[in-house]
Image (tube, rainbow, N blue to C red):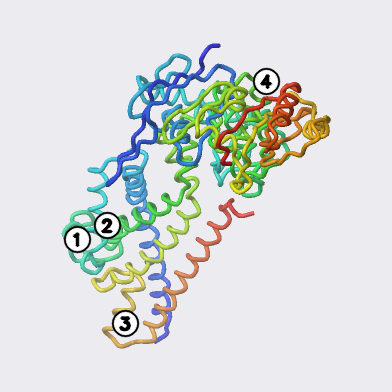
Amino acid sequence: MWDNEVIMMLVTNTGITLYMTLLSTLMAYVIGLPLGVALVVTAKDGLRPNAAAFGILDFIVNIVRSVPFLILLILVIPLTRLIVGKSYGPGATIVPLVIAAAPFIARLVESSLLEVDKGVIEAAQSMGANLWTIIFKVLLAEARTSLIVGVTIALGTILGYSAMAGVVGGGGLGDIAIRYGYYRYESDIMWVTVILLVLLVQILQVIGTKLSKKLDKRGR
Amino acid sequence: MEAMIQIKDVTKTFIGRDNTVEALKGINLDIEKGAICGIIGMSGAGKSTLVRCLNFLEKPTSGTVLVEGRDLRTMNDAQLRKTRTEIAMIFQHFNLLMQRNVVDNICFPLEIVGMKRREAKKRAAELLEIVGLSDKAKAYPAQLSGGQKQRVAIARALANNPKILLCDEATSALDPTTTKSILALLKEINEKYGITIVIITHEMTVVQEICNQVAIIDNGNLVESGSVEEVFSRPKTKAAQKLVFQGGGSTEVMRGKRCVRIVFRENSSFEPVIGNMVLACKAPVNILLADTKDIGGIAHGQMVLQLPEDGVTAEKMIHYLKERNLTVEELTDYVG
């Protein structure tokens, strides 16, 4: 059974998993990063405290975060159909992945930005910096290593979610694992996909850690 | 003298969930143009809040702050930010951008005012020259000592040619030697560029060293203000006395019946005044507190002496000291 066809299938689906993971993470950051910044800025001791705005954002993030991904996957099927035109395959998996990951990423970004020394923010204010300068040149710039660690965590989590989408024919390695390992009892194929998933997470982790270390100027 | 900053009836109340704190209870103070003004008080006295009211990092609950006659409260956001570029600030913990090197830290305020990169770099190099750190241009803050970090912070503060420099406990995290060198740098800046400096501190020695104007804050009130000479020689209030007698510690047990405090200002440090006095009057004295130092050959500081029981000798001693141009003050209840 280890013919060319199976190997090709594994290679292709590794590619699909990577594609789903990277694209969903990127798109989730497009939503999650500004959301995280907004949470920090509107918080009680933030740069522009706004209890109403913070309350709404915080509530939305909590609600989406508390829905288990497998349930969310099914809940958003109508929306997925609307956007992608079908409810299965890698393209369709990206929709629930982005929806699930964005609030998670918002929380990662929020906690990274809260690590930035309040004194440095105060110093920037004392120099006459405006809100946007503080966000880009102080908050995001000073938190960059922590943000990169966050990206690594997000990638690992989203990779895991993408495998879960195999249950509904989402494509990628998770799909293979379920179809061959679970439905057809071909457990050796399942084990290979698991090893491939572990390897992917390891590679992403190593790259993330290296990059954040390289960009961190705080050590001596 | 023209006032650079006028503080009028400034109050600040922090409203918490279950308690309100009146940090400032109606402060009035004029800070003269070109002065080095020390605002001194125990921790929690409200001095850090007061300095933040001077650039509206904290908006006073009531009262006005005028900078060169301009009322900060009537300004809109943009005007306030513009004014803040004229009021630089340095901090106890330096507050440098840890992910930027020294040059880029100094360029930051220049970026804020929209200066071109090349010009900003040139200006940063000049500023590093002024603070004596040209060789550290490419270093990151984590690679610098405390004193060096504060020098970078000072260079950064000077970048936009401010009229005022606010120092919030700027030397409190530094050792005495480094403190001295930073204070010398501040004095140099004040003299060379005519920048008005406001120094927040809890250490009397800092005020003595470089300030010419001083204000004492206690429990949200301004209890005493004036020239350093005046306030230091004759502290009128309890709070002022406590700060001036700092470091007295547990002298309670040694408390004598008749104590005097003497302040050294213009005596030559080469002359052993107390020693000569003892020889001249042929009676010993007990030194309860001594805090003097030699600044440029002149003795500065204070001593508290317990005089002999014999009234005639005591009078003779006081007379001897007064003759040598020392401020002598009888202490009725010296507590240290």
The one nearer the camera, B231 or B177, is B231
What is the C-alpha distance between the residues marked 4 and 2? 60 Å
Q: Residue at x 59, y 34 (%)?
A: B244
Image mark 3: chain: A
Residue located beneath label 2 in the image:
A99
Mark 1 or mark 4, whichever is nearer to me? 4
- The answer to whether residue B314 is above or below residue A162 is above
Q: Quadrant of residue A195?
A: bottom left
Residue A76, numbered label: 1
| SS type, badge 1 | loop
Q: What is the CA distance from the residue labelled 3 to the residue labelled 1?
A: 26 Å
Q: Amino acid at mark 1?
A: Val
Residue B192 - label: 4
In terms of sequence position, does the residue under pointer 1 or pointer 2 come before the other?
Answer: 1
Mark 4 neighbour density, 10 Å: few (under 14) some (14–19) many (20 or more): few
Q: Quadrant of the C terminus of chain A?
A: bottom right
Chain for disc number 1: A
* Residue A124, x across and y down, in percent: 48, 36
Q: Sort mark 2 into few (<14), some (14-19) or many (20+) by Cα contacts within 10 Å.
A: many
